[in-house]
Amino acid sequence: MRHILRKLGFYAVAAWLALTLNFLLPRLIPGDPVQLMLSRMQSIGGSVTPGQEDALRKMLGLSDGNIAQQYGDYLVSLAHLDFGLSITFFPTPVGDVVRQAVPWTLVLVGMATLLSVVLGITLGTLAGWRRGGKLDALVPSATFLAAIPYFWVALLLIYLTTQVSHLFPQGGGYDETYDIGLNADFLGSAVEHGILPAVTIVLSSVGGWMLGMRNMMVSTLAEDYVIAAEAKGLRPRTVMIGYAARNAVLPSVAGFAITLGFIVSGSLVMEIVFSYPGMGFTMLQAVTNNDYPLMQAVFLMITFAVLAANFLVDLVYALVDPRTRQVTS
């Protein structure tokens, strides 16, 4: 329990720092972001009410008063999940825009990342167990894939599957002629549009997991407890999974928490390449249109998602390796 409380305290501090940085972002922007937002609203046909400027300043933490009062107003707005109105999708509230984008990124990035981790660890386990075999010969190729940026893989897949063979749609998240909902036409179109982005994530990240797990398996197989298990005559599968892989996977679990931010950032860039309607593409639209409320909301959502995932990984690591609880308790 003390281990969990310490982790909660650490991530609470990290979340507070993210909130504070989000508060400071508008202050780092040259000029007056509120006036820029109001001008943008008027240019797209929006009407500016007398109290709208004050509301925007309060939401961005730029209202009248000292810095402490502005920070308090900012926290109150966030506590009520009030991110203001989106300039890009005016007059739609920012919260509605984010709620529409989150499921796309959550399903695509979540499932593709989980698949790449499971596939990479499985292949790495087999390659390390049968080192020198055919699967182990794929390690250099896996290393090459791990070194390729997400966007380059995405562009290559777009060229091969939309210009050369015409197998998949070029971009987007679904066929816009279908109504969004739990119907066969929409779901089938969403799956078809999501194949290339998912393949991009898997190809770009599976090599790193495979290489890391393979190297740890080779190192673990030389340990005394593995040699003793083999000497007892245990089944090879039991030795591979119960003794070698169980201990070799620990660095991969810890590495997942460390690399999660890079995975998310790469996935967001991939969404931009495919014009996929997730958080990455939404962030691009916000930056392009100087939509500061939407940028702040997307930044917080991504940050909190990474923090929550890291916290869960820490809990899983503590369950897999009880020694971590003993060290920190």
Image: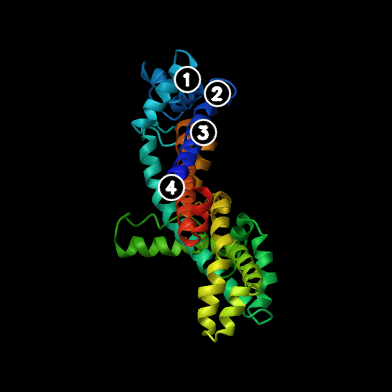
The residue singled out by tag 2 in the image is 27
CB under 8 Å between discs 2 and 1 = yes
Residue 266 appears in view: no
> Callout 3, which amino acid?
Leu
> Callout 2, which amino acid?
Arg
Secondary structure of residue under mark 4: helix
The residue singled out by tag 1 in the image is 62
Comes first in the chain, label 4 or label 1: 4
How far apart are the alpha carbons under marks 2 and 3? 16 Å
Comes first in the chain, label 1 or label 3: 3
Comes first in the chain, label 2 or label 4: 4
Comes first in the chain, label 2 or label 1: 2
The disc label shown at residue 17, or none: 3
Q: Is the residue 168 above or below the residue 36 in the image?
A: below
How far apart are the alpha carbons under marks 3 and 4? 20 Å
Mark 2 vs mark 4: give the one in front.
4
Identify the residue at the far bottom of this view: 233
Q: Count of labels shown?
A: 4
How far apart are the alpha carbons under marks 2 and 4? 35 Å
CB under 8 Å between discs 2 and 4 = no
In this rendering, position of residue 151 left or right of residue 328: right
Comes first in the chain, label 3 or label 4: 4
Secondary structure of residue under mark 3: helix
Secondary structure of residue under mark 1: loop
Mark 4 vs mark 1: give the one in front.
4
The disc label shown at residue 4, or none: 4
